Image (cartoon, helix red, strand yellow):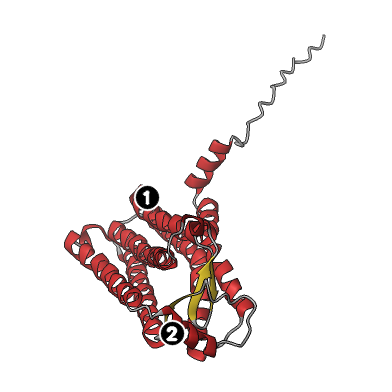
């Protein structure tokens, strides 16, 4: 577990930023399929601009995606050992390429935000009339160019999934192909890798399913505000699902939590009963 601690810490950091923004600081009310909405969180009381709040959410979301690649790369590097070591330069290139793609795409989207009055007119024409929850004075339109945003999200998601799949496949092949490894060590490494996959797959569904719905609504231009709200709720469950899966799956974290809460099972000492031998006369 020690070798993967930093990668998990990096993953948990972005989880905290994303979930605290989504459920407390920003609380976005998103109106799909238009890329518009308005925040309901506490940052409004501090007069933080809606654009800045959206930027933090987007940064944290893609930070989670990049940290997933880091976990799978960490497992592969640790298990492959000297037989196939990814140099520091190659690691920097992988992470730099991911961050550069995300950063440039995000900068383009937010630097080309449309003039809000004109964008609101376009959005108003695309949505059903007289929506009770569409408060025009508070709505912020991120973009009216749905093609670029849709393509950008697809490229990032496909790239992240492909990298995780490649590292995962290589890791499994190394586990079963390494010679000189005892069966016990092979079982331990395989067990830890499978636990990590399960731990990441559970919360990943909380991101992938709503993300797929967002892409679907943008492609078909389907509007259902109830489903929009459900998608945001599923996103907000990502953090607690990550925490629960980590505690349930990994015994070191589970034991540490139990000890901190003071609910360790106390061993009850059963007094020994000494029986005296029966003497017969």
> Is residue 251 in sight in this rendering?
yes
Give residue 54's position: percent from left, percent from top: 43, 67
How far apart in space, not on screen, are marks 2 and 1 (Cα)? Answer: 49 Å
Give residue 235's position: percent from left, percent from top: 53, 67
Secondary element type, mark 1: helix
Q: Nearer the viewer, residue 237 or 130?
A: 130
Give residue 204's position: percent from left, percent from top: 48, 67
Q: Is residue 158 above or below residue 43?
A: below
Q: Residues within 10 Å of mark 2 (few under 14, many from 20)?
A: few
Q: Is residue 265 above or below residue 272?
A: below
Please identify the quarter of the rendering in which residue 109 is found: bottom left
- Say left or right for 7 vs 250: left
Q: Residues within 10 Å of mark 1 (few under 14, many from 20)?
A: few
Give residue 68's position: percent from left, percent from top: 38, 64
Q: How many numbered markers are drawn?
A: 2
Secondary element type, mark 2: helix
For the point 37% across and 50% down, the residue is: 5
- Say left or right for 124 vs 155: right
Q: Do labels 2 and 1 touch, CB within 8 Å?
A: no
Please identify the quarter of the rendering in which residue 167 is found: bottom left
Q: Nearer the viewer, residue 170 or 41?
A: 41
- Say left or right for 224 vs 3: right
For the point 19% across and 59% down, the residue is: 88
Q: Which residue is mark 2?
A: 118
Quadrant (top left/top right/bottom left/bottom right) for the C terminus? top right
For the point 34% across and 59% down, the residue is: 75
Mark nearer the viewer, 2 or 1:
2
Q: Which residue is mark 1?
A: 5
Q: Nearer the viewer, residue 150 or 280?
A: 150
For the point 65% across and 78% down, the residue is: 132
Instruction: Give residue 29's mark.
Output: none
């Amino acid at each position: 577990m020690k070798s993967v601690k930093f990668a998990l810490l990096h993953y948990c950091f972005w989880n905290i930023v994303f979930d605290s923004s989504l459920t407390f600081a920003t609380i976005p009310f998103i109106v799909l399929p238009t890329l518009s909405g308005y925040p309901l969180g506490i940052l409004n009381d501090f007069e933080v601009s809606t654009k800045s709040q959206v930027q933090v959410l987007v940064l944290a979301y893609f930070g989670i995606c990049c940290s997933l690649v880091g976990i799978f790369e960490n497992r592969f590097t640790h298990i492959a050992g000297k037989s196939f070591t990814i140099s520091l330069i190659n690691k920097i290139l992988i992470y730099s390429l991911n961050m550069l793609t995300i950063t440039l795409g995000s900068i383009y989207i937010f630097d080309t935000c449309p003039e809000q009055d004109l964008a609101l007119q376009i959005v108003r024409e695309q949505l059903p009339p007289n929506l009770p929850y569409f408060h025009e004075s508070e709505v912020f339109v991120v973009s009216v160019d749905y093609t670029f945003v849709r393509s950008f999200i697809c490229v990032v998601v496909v790239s992240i999934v492909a990298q995780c799949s490649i590292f995962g496949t290589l890791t499994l092949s190394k586990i079963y192909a390494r010679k000189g490894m005892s069966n016990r060590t092979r079982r331990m490494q395989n067990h830890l890798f499978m636990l990590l996959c399960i731990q990441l797959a559970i919360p990943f569904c909380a991101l992938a399913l709503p993300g797929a719905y967002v892409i679907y609504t943008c492609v078909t231009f389907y509007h259902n505000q109830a489903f929009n709200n459900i998608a945001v709720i599923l996103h907000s469950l990502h953090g607690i699902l990550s925490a629960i899966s980590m505690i349930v799956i990994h015994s070191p974290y589970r034991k540490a939590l139990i000890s901190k809460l003071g609910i360790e099972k106390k061993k009850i000492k059963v007094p020994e009963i000494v029986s005296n031998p029966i003497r017969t006369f």
